[in-house]
Amino acid sequence: MKEKIDEFKKLIQESNNIVFFGGAGVSTESGIPDFRSKDGLYNQKYKYPPEEILSHTFFMNKTEEFYEFYREKMNSLKYEPNITHIKLAELEQQGKLKAVITQNIDGLHQKAGSKNVLELHGSVLRNYCMKCNKFYDAEYVFTGSDSIPKCSCGGIIKPDVVLYEEGLNGDIIENSIKAIINADLMIVAGTSLTVNPASSLINYFRGNNLVLINRDKTPYDYRAFLVINESLGKIFKEI
């Protein structure tokens, strides 16, 4: 393991155009549960399957029950960035890391200080009225007294997160592809790489230095220059 960490550190030192692509595993060490592990959100018992609750249809038809689940399980305001978020922000400040592409919606990369964060699935920090498009922050949605948060115009407020049945933001995808194409080092971490279209972005990387860091194997391990099956915290505290 030490040899792999040393090799990873060497790659970072020699690279000047790094892109980081992260999934739920980036935030688990902050205390935020992931989705697909045995203790993850999708393996817990609810009245409806989480995949159904977090769908556009469910939001539109059962808005009150959506928000009951959303407030309980998606509130990331109480969590703090971990060592991985912090080190990535430092690499950006040094001019080495050009973009963080994330599947997470918790806003912890920005909380750690990262500026160029491409959020594939949106963010709980942004919320908009479906009627007049007025912006509301996360505190308003998570701590409001009403079961369904409403705008001053009377419209229902919707989180700016990509629900099932909704498409990804085209501009975010385009900017992610550009960053990946131009990268000389791509670090993929904390993701099983099984959810499309996000996982397919890895196919745009044209360089040789692809690093995969994940506790479990992924379908793309065979393509990586370096595979590290270890917790992100242990790896990034060495950077």
Image (cartoon, rainbow, N blue to C red):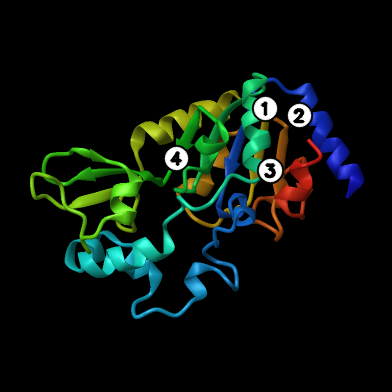
Q: Position of residue 67 (x, y in %)?
A: 29, 63
The three-letter amino acid code for the residue at tag 2 is Ile
Q: Secondary structure at mark 2?
A: helix
Classify 15 as above or below 216.
above
Q: Are marks 1 and 3 in contact (CB under 8 Å)?
A: no
How far is disc 1 from disc 3 in space, using C-alphas?
Answer: 12 Å
The three-letter amino acid code for the residue at tag 4 is Glu
How many neighbours does mark 3 have within 10 angstroms: few (below 14), some (14-19), or many (20 or more)?
many
How far is disc 2 from disc 4 in space, using C-alphas?
Answer: 23 Å
Residue beneath the point at 56% across and 50% down: 23
How far is disc 3 from disc 2 in space, using C-alphas?
Answer: 16 Å
Q: Are marks 1 and 4 in contact (CB under 8 Å)?
A: no
Residue 167 seen anywhere in this rendered image of the structure: no
Residue 12's mark?
Answer: 2
Q: Secondary structure at mark 3?
A: helix
How far is disc 2 from disc 1 in space, using C-alphas?
Answer: 9 Å
Residue 119's mark?
Answer: 4
Q: Are marks 2 and 1 in contact (CB under 8 Å)?
A: yes
Classify 229 as above or below 2.
below
How many neighbours does mark 2 have within 10 angstroms: few (below 14), some (14-19), or many (20 or more)?
many
Residue 91's mark?
Answer: 1
Outermost residue to the left: 153
How many neighbours does mark 1 have within 10 angstroms: few (below 14), some (14-19), or many (20 or more)?
some
